[in-house]
Amino acid sequence: MSKAMEQTRSGSRLRVIILSAVIACTLLLGAGFVAYASGLMGDYVDVTVDVETVEEHGLRDAIVVAFSVPVSLEEAQRGVSLSPSVEGSVEAVRATAVPGYASTYAFVPKDHFEPGVTYTVRVDDVESLAKSRLTPESFTFTTIDYPEITAVVPAHEDVIDIDAPLSLTFDHLSDDFDVSVVLDPPADLRESRQGSTLTYTPETLLLQGQEYEVSVRMAVAGAALEMKQATATVHTRGPVSLVETSPSADQAAASQVAPIMMRFDRAIEQEGFEQHVTIDPEVAGEFVWLDDTTAQFFPEVYLPEATTFTVSLDDQIQARDDAGHVSGGTQFAFTTRKGNGRLVPPPVQAPTRTEGRVVEVDLAQQALYAYEDGELINAFLISSGLPSMPTPAGEFEITRKKPVTTYRWNYGEGDPRNYDLAGVQWNMNLSGSLYWLHGAYWHNNFGYRMSHGCVNIATPDAGWLYEFTEVGTPVRIYY
């Protein structure tokens, strides 16, 4: 065999070996591609799908759709739909090695789902990479609903203090909703949260004696026009007020020596109280508190006769136990009696009792003194019995009271001492006697003996004493 023939044969064997190697490589690569494709396509089985949902779906939470094999974005966008319809987009979540294919997609709402709505997710006959198709399936989910109010403090129509917070408890709270409270008339409120309770505290004091409409507004977060609202009404407590004064408002013929008393509807902050009370014309004196609600002003000297005084209280007088205060412009006025040259003298004896209410009559000074728990409450001139018909001294009690009665006595025909007095007001009988404390309208000579044994009192003063006493009130009459 020639050398040329051997070379030709060698070349043929090389070509066969290379061709065989190429065929073998091709077969190996083909087997690998089939295995890879088989893995991607699920061995050509039908496509299945699962939609991940929760019991109360968030309004902006995506809907996750998981396929058993990869599908294209176009197929997912075509095949996934919601009812009721919601504007949104389908986006790949878990991509594969094959471009444009993913096994998990998410439907993301453009704005938000509607609260408390049940939606149906339908997945139609989506085609996979291996051309297998999904049997259409549907799933449902329900979105979280608006919070429901379970408790409100204060309750509807309650009366509250002017600094009282408003508390609302809900069945749930979430970031899906904005909750706010608005008052009408308007007031700035500071919000705080603890669990499912929102508390709104006024930044400044509310108006006193005001009706407020409380509006609770709930909106989808970021969508202020979509709103659910509930309302209630509360009333703030009225201002601190005077419930009683002595002398009474517009009283005429008031005592010139009795203290000026002010009783409020609640306990008062006593520190600095006197700085917020003015008396016009100005009077020197001091304030004494009988109890938490009652202040008395004791003038240093007798008030001038036939003079009108105005007592004014400013709005800095504060309640002790709440944020209430007196309304500006609160005032009352009274006029002292026109005298007969005599003023009520100060008592020369201390009261014999220091508990409860007691009345003491000083026959020597022709004056009556009313005490409560040892404190002088009021004093005024009286007219006791003439020397021939004296008022008895001693310890008595009031046993009967008559708002109006008639007094008559006949000493004999034509006797100048006879009397018949009708319409006598404010009558208080002294125990074990025929004598009374009563008003007298037939003279104005108080401070001097005038009566037939009873204790005559100016009618306004008698009215005050009638209210001050009750059956059983002790009365001591002395010289």
Image: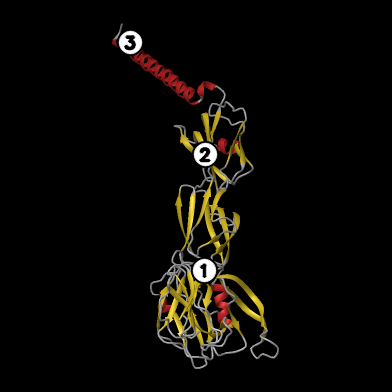
Q: How is the image coloured?
A: secondary structure
Q: Looking at the image, which is closer to me, 469 or 324?
A: 469
Indicate which label's residue lies in the foreground, 2 or 1. 1
Q: Residues within 10 Å of mark 3 (few under 14, many from 20)?
A: few
Marked residue nearer the N-terminal end (2 or 3): 3
For image coordinates 49% across by 67% down, the residue present is: 266
Outermost front residue: 412
Q: Which residue is mark 2?
A: 106
Q: Residue furthest top?
A: 1
Q: Amino acid at mark 2?
A: Ala
For the residues labelled 2 and 3, the Cα–Cα distance comes to: 71 Å
Q: Give the percent coordinates (x, y) of residue 416.
A: 65, 91
* Quadrant where the image shows the C terminus: bottom left
Where is residue 276, by image quadrant? bottom left
* Element type where label 2 sits in the image: strand
* Residue drawn 57% across the image and 90% down it: 444
Locate residue 403 relative to residue 107 in the image: left or right.
right
Secondary structure found at label 3:
helix
